Image: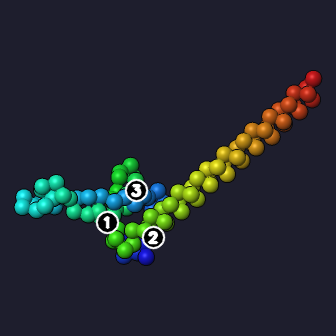
Amino acid sequence: MDAHAKSGEPLPKNAAVCAQWVRCGKASCRCARGEPHGPYHYLFWRSGGRLRKRYVRAADAEAARQTTLHHRQEARRARETTGEGRRQWRVLLGGVRELERHERE
């Protein structure tokens, strides 16, 4: 089950799962003495120019981490494929321009 299953939203494509240690703020708590609670896992992503954060249950943290890793790998492959296509396009365009130059001569 992913971190967004309860809300019915798909997992954001640009998300990352991070563990954080937190302080509750109670003066008598151990975290006030420097021993914070956690780690708690959160899903971070950017939307509308803002950083968003959502709690991920410990039981779902690894599945969410794997999903976000998969999204990043897909995005990287898409960028590489696009870059290769652009490189091929520049080579072809250079060949066409070379042919046009020879036809004018």
Identified by mark 3, the residue type is Trp
Residue 16 x %, y %: 42, 58
Q: Is residue 97 left or right of residue 1?
A: right
User: Picture quarter containing residue 30?
Assistant: bottom left
Q: Residues within 10 Å of mark 3 (few under 14, many from 20)?
A: some
Q: CA distance from mark 1 to mark 2?
A: 14 Å
Q: Is residue 25 left or right of residue 10?
A: left
- The residue sitting at 70% across, 46% down in the picture is 84
Which numbered disc, 3 or 2, marks the residue that appears first in the sequence?
3
Label 2 sits on residue: 63
Q: CA distance from mark 3 to mark 2?
A: 16 Å
Element type at marker 2? helix
Which numbered disc, 1 or 2, marks the residue that appears first in the sequence?
1
Q: Residues within 10 Å of mark 2 (few under 14, many from 20)?
A: some
Label 3 sits on residue: 45
Q: Furthest-left residue in view?
A: 28
Q: Which mark is residue 55?
A: 1
The answer to whether residue 9 of the structure is visible from this angle is no
Q: CA distance from mark 3 to mark 1?
A: 12 Å
Element type at marker 3? strand
Of circles 3 and 2, the one toward us is 2
Q: Is residue 37 left or right of residue 57?
A: left
Q: Residues within 10 Å of mark 1 (few under 14, many from 20)?
A: some
Identified by mark 1, the residue type is Tyr
Q: Of 42 and 30, which appears nearest the observer?
A: 30
User: Picture quarter containing residue 24?
Assistant: bottom left
